[in-house]
Amino acid sequence: MAQKAFQTYYPEVMAHCYGCGTLNEYGHQIKSFWDGEESVCHFMPKPYHIAIPGYVYGGMLASLIDCHGTGTAAAAAYRAAGRAMDTEPAFRFLTASLHVDYLKPTPLGIELEIRGKVKDVKGRKVVIEVWIAASGITTVRGEVVAVQVPDEMVAALLQAKPG
Amino acid sequence: MAQKAFQTYYPEVMAHCYGCGTLNEYGHQIKSFWDGEESVCHFMPKPYHIAIPGYVYGGMLASLIDCHGTGTAAAAAYRAAGRAMDTEPAFRFLTASLHVDYLKPTPLGIELEIRGKVKDVKGRKVVIEVWIAASGITTVRGEVVAVQVPDEMVAALLQAKPG
C-alpha cells in the first residue's frame, strides 16, 4: 500500500497551515514521507518565489525546512511511541526554534528535495535536521526544534471548531 | 522630506525578491525604515498566513525576519560607508544564515511590528538582530547573518538584464 503523507494525518482543525496544511488552498501544501530512517519531501517553487533572478527566495527555503521539520517531528513521535499515524490522539508539533544555513544559492526552476533526520526525541520536544538539495547538490542545511502543541491549545481549538 | 523605504533603493535587477522586492507583484513587498538606531517595518499578514487557527505561520515570520534583516544590512552598510542610500554602487545583501526563536504564538489579524538592530558590520558581512511584536508583545526573536551579493553575481545579473 502506498504511504500516505504525514500531513494527511493532521487533525482537521490543525490542517490549515500555510506551509503544510492540506486545507489551506492558498498555501504550499507540502507532503512529507518516510524514506527509511530519513524523511523526504519534493517541492517545486513557483517562478515568483524568487530571491535574485535565477535563485529561490530564502524565506521559502526556511518555510520548507520549518514545515518538513514539524511534519517529521510528528511522524517521529508516532514511531517513538510505537503507534501508527492513524491512531488517536494525533501528534502535532509547532516550531520552537529554526536555524537555516544558506550554503549556496538554490537554483529556481528545479524540483527541490527536502530531507529530514531525527536528531532527538525527548518528551514533547523533537529535534530534526533538515537539508535541501537541487539536482543532487545540497544548498541549504537547517535544524528545527519542534514542540508538541500544548494540550490546552488543542482543547481550545477543538472547542472553537465550527459545527 | 519623508524617508523612503530601504527596499526602494535596490537596483531594479535585484528588486524581484518575493519577500521584499518592489517589483514582485505576488510577494510581500515589505518596507523597512530607520527609526533612530533601530530599523522598523510594519506588516499585516493575510488571513491565510495561518499556522494553527488564530496564529501566524512560522514560515512567514521567518521570512519577515530574513528580508527585514537583509534590508537593514544594506542600510547599515551605507551608514558604515558614510554614504547616502541613493549613491552608487548599490548595496544588496543575501542571507548566509538565519536563526529564529518562536517565543510565543503570534496572533493573526494584528499588524506586526518588525524591528532590527545592527550587531556587527565587518567587511561584506553584517549581523542583524531582529524581533517581531504584536500589540507591543515580542513573540519572535531572530538573527540574520547577511553577506553582500558577490560582485560577479551582480555583474552577471546586470549583463542578463533584458533590454
Image (spheres, coloured by chain):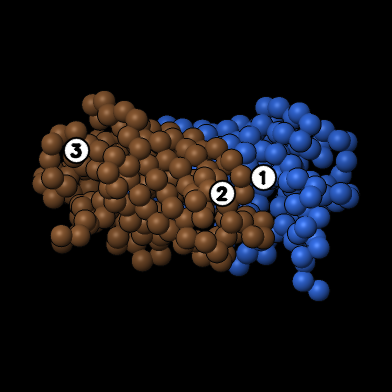
Chain colours: A blue, B brown
Query: How far across and down, in percent of the image, does residue B108 sit?
Result: 57, 60
- Left or right of B20? Residue B140 is right
Dot 1, crowdedness within 10 Å: few (<14), some or many (≥20)? many
Residue type at numbered disc 3 = Arg
Q: Mark 2 sits on what residue?
A: B58
Pointer 3 local density, CA inside 10 Å: few below 14, some 14–19, many at least 20: few
**Which of the two labelled residues, at mark 3 and mark 2, occupies the earlier sequence position?**
2
Residue A40 drawn at (x, y percent): 64, 42
Q: Chain of mark 3?
A: B
Q: Look at the image and tell me whether residue B38 can be seen.
A: yes
Q: What is the spatial separation of the Cα atoms under label 1 and label 3, in whole angstroms?
A: 38 Å
Q: Where does the image place residue A50, in percent across and percent down from the top left?
A: 38, 53
**Subunit bearing disc 1:** A
| Residue on which the image places disc 3 | B79
For residue A133, side relative to residue A154 (left or right):
left
Left or right: B2 as drawn, with respect to A147:
left
Depth check, mark 3 against mark 2: the one in front is 3
Q: Residue furthest bottom?
A: A163
Q: Are marks 2 and 1 in contact (CB under 8 Å)?
A: yes
Residue ID for mark 1: A94
Nearest the camera: B26 or B107? B107
- Disc 2 versus disc 1: distance between alpha carbons? 9 Å
Q: Secondary structure at mark 3?
A: helix
Chain of the residue that carries numbered disc 2 in the rendered image: B
Q: Are marks 3 and 2 on the same chain?
A: yes
